[in-house]
Image (cartoon, rainbow, N blue to C red):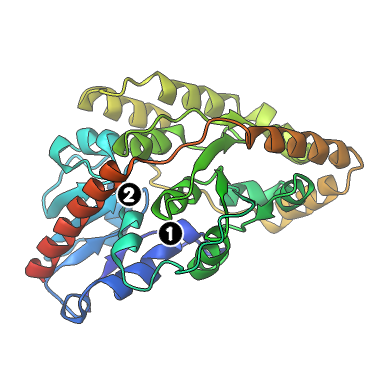
Amino acid sequence: MMEIIYFRDPEGNFGDDLNADLWPALLPQHVLDSDRVRLLGIGSILNATSLARAGQSRLPTFVLGSGTSYGRPPHDLDGLTVNAVRGPFTARALGHPEAAVTDGAILMAATPGFLPATRAASGIVYVPHHKSLWRGHWKRVAETAGMTFIDPRWPVGKVLQVMAGAKLVIAEAMHGAIFADTLRIPWIPIVGSPRIDAFKWRDWTLSIEQAYNPIMIPSSTWVEAQEVRQLQQTEQMRIEAFKLGDHATQAELVAYLTSRHPESAGVHKAPLTASMRRIVLAGSRLAANVTHVGHAAEALSKASNGPQYLSRDAVFDSRLSRMMDGVQVLTKMA
């Protein structure tokens, strides 16, 4: 059976979990059964540490729609077939500018029966980043703003079903915007925390010829507000990501990623410990949170009137066609 390499969040995250649903639905059975190749799937997993954790293998590893961001990009690409990556930042950081396509999630549009057939096009949905749920009251914020809340820990099918009924998607989670674009629903990016990774957002938005100009939203809880104040260094690195030119060189991109993650930790920080959860729970009971929720809801409502984004049909079709070319190459390799 072909190994599909992707990040598995113990609490669930629909952008990563898409790998478990999409590839079995899209790829021919002989590819899924193959022991001749491995697939590096959707997610920010193109870094030295993640690949090391995936283990050495005599098999070629086929890269299709993956991105870099966490940790230093791999300098040794031996054994990797870099066919298509998330965007031009990832492609140039790897030294393969020709591989810039888009995020692999676009392949949902080429998978029969994967996307909901019924589209209601009414109402607004909000999709926070999964880490924002650790300390925030974003469901309450969305409901106060009159929006439908999508929990990023939901199964992929439920996320798609709820989103398909919307006329607009407001997304802090990048894959919230990617799912919306794939469903051909306009989207608006927002940021409620310095944890949001502008580098990977820009990587993807550049791939579909759109800008990334997120609207800032205030914290939804007292605990969240304290964390934002403490994340000065993270906020500075977010700002530095915006300073990178659209045509930044390989050296500039690698230098940025290395300086942001000098430990090359490869990846996603662990969820809150039990003691941390108790602190967050205590903070979540503060009366001050009513004010935080109100301010955040007001800002979220105002953001819904901001500039909307959606890739042009010609660009979308071109990127999807290029990704399907990659699927055909993988099919032949297997």
For the residue labelled by badge 2, is the local secondary structure a helix, a strand or a loop? Answer: loop
| Alpha carbon separation for disc pair 1 and 2 | 12 Å
Judging depth in this view, the residue of 45 and 279 nearest the camera is 45
Who comes first in sequence, dot 1 or dot 2? 1
The count of marks equals: 2
Q: Percent from the top left, x then y, of residue 319? A: 24, 47
Q: Amino acid at mark 1?
A: Asp
Q: Residue at x 39, y 38 (%)?
A: 200
In this figure, which residue is indicated by the disc labeled 1?
16
In the image, is residue 41 above or below residue 203? below
Q: Percent from the top left, x then y, of residue 104? A: 31, 54
Q: Amino acid at mark 2?
A: Asp
Instruction: Give the quadrant of the N terminus.
Output: bottom left
In the image, is residue 243 above or below residue 114? above
Left of 209 or right of it: where is 241? right
For the residue labelled by badge 1, is the local secondary structure a helix, a strand or a loop? Answer: helix
Which disc is residue 35 wearing? none
In this figure, which residue is indicated by the disc labeled 2?
103
In the image, is residue 72 above or below residue 213? below
- Can residue 263 be seen here? The reply is no
